Amino acid sequence: MPSMKSIKRRISSVDTTKKIMQAMDMVSVTKLQKARSRLEMIAPFVDEAKNMIARLEKCEDIGENIYFKPRPLQKTAYVLITSDRGLCGSHNVNLTEKLLSRIGAGGSEMILAVGLMGREYFKRRGRNIAFTYPEVSETMFFEDTMRIADDLISLYTLGKVGEAYMAYTRFESALTHVPTIVKLLPLHRSTAPANLSEEMRYEPDAQSFLKYAVPMHLSAYIYAALIESSACEQAARMITMDSAVSNADDIIGKLTRMYNHKRQSAITQEISEIVGSANM
């Protein structure tokens, strides 16, 4: 049986851990609020970038453009967005396992790992990590997503990959996070007839304009996904920390009852010894 001193020491240790978990919970709440605010701010920009590509899809002279023309099956690039740190429940595991099941046996993938957790997961399984972007999920600068988009476009235009996808966690609510895989390249060619009221003139031509529009479109899309993933990470960490604090309270309660029981037993024994000595 543990002594009263060791029980008291353990109560103090668990209480210290509880305070750390509470601090991490408060930090996650603040970061979640910031991420949701940034997501609301970037939404109009992302929507406009999508609309720009949608309008370009209807141009007659882009059918053979490299960003729209399908290619023979070859290597596939995956932009994988995970966190740099753990303690966020199954946030990273759900996404990495979903992507792993999609890749299958492997060998034909090139992974652009945004976040260390995803990189370590696939590195341990011997998968091809083409690029790694540490701390991007923490800072969330738009310039970083432009660099990711440039690397992805470079792989695609040089013919090293024939398709590109993005794997991230979609934020639906603080309690609902959906692992999602979406296609980035080649872009979908719309078969719907063009609306004459929406026709635009591109200078010098639509083909040249695409060279600037596609990187901007991909950067905006990746940036929005990065913010959504960050919101999911903070929400998952907040839930995990709440659960840890609750477990710490349960442990402290059990240890406190054990301590009080041993203390009461020790007092009873002392009283018995005093009474026994007085009757002698």
Image: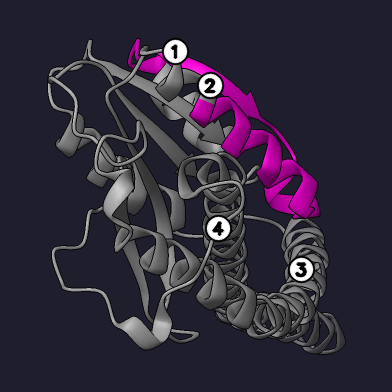
Q: Is residue 89 above or below residue 73?
A: below
**Mark 4 burial class by Cα count in 10 Å: few <14, some 14-19, many 20+:** few
Ranked by sequence position, the earlier of labels 3 and 1 is 3
Residue 188, percent from left and from top: 25, 53
Q: Residue at x 74, y 60 (%)?
A: 10
Is disc 2 in contact with disc 1, using a CB cutoff of under 8 Å? Answer: yes
Magenta residue span = 124-153
**The N terminus: image quadrant:** bottom right
**Disc 1 designates what residue?**
158
Marks 2 and 4, how far apart at CA: 24 Å
- The colour scheme applied to this rendered structure is one colour
**Disc 3 designates what residue?**
24
Magenta highlight on residue 134: yes
Q: Is residue 177 above or below residue 134?
A: below
Residue 244, percent from left and from top: 58, 70
Is disc 4 in contact with disc 1, using a CB cutoff of under 8 Å? Answer: no
- Which of discs 3 and 4 lies nearer the camera? The answer is 4
Tag 2 secondary structure: helix
**Disc 4 designates what residue?**
202
Asked whether residue 249 is in view, the answer is: no
Ranked by sequence position, the earlier of labels 2 and 4 is 2
**Mark 3 burial class by Cα count in 10 Å: few <14, some 14-19, many 20+:** some
Ranked by sequence position, the earlier of labels 2 and 3 is 3
**Disc 2 designates what residue?**
154
Kind of residue at disc 4? Tyr
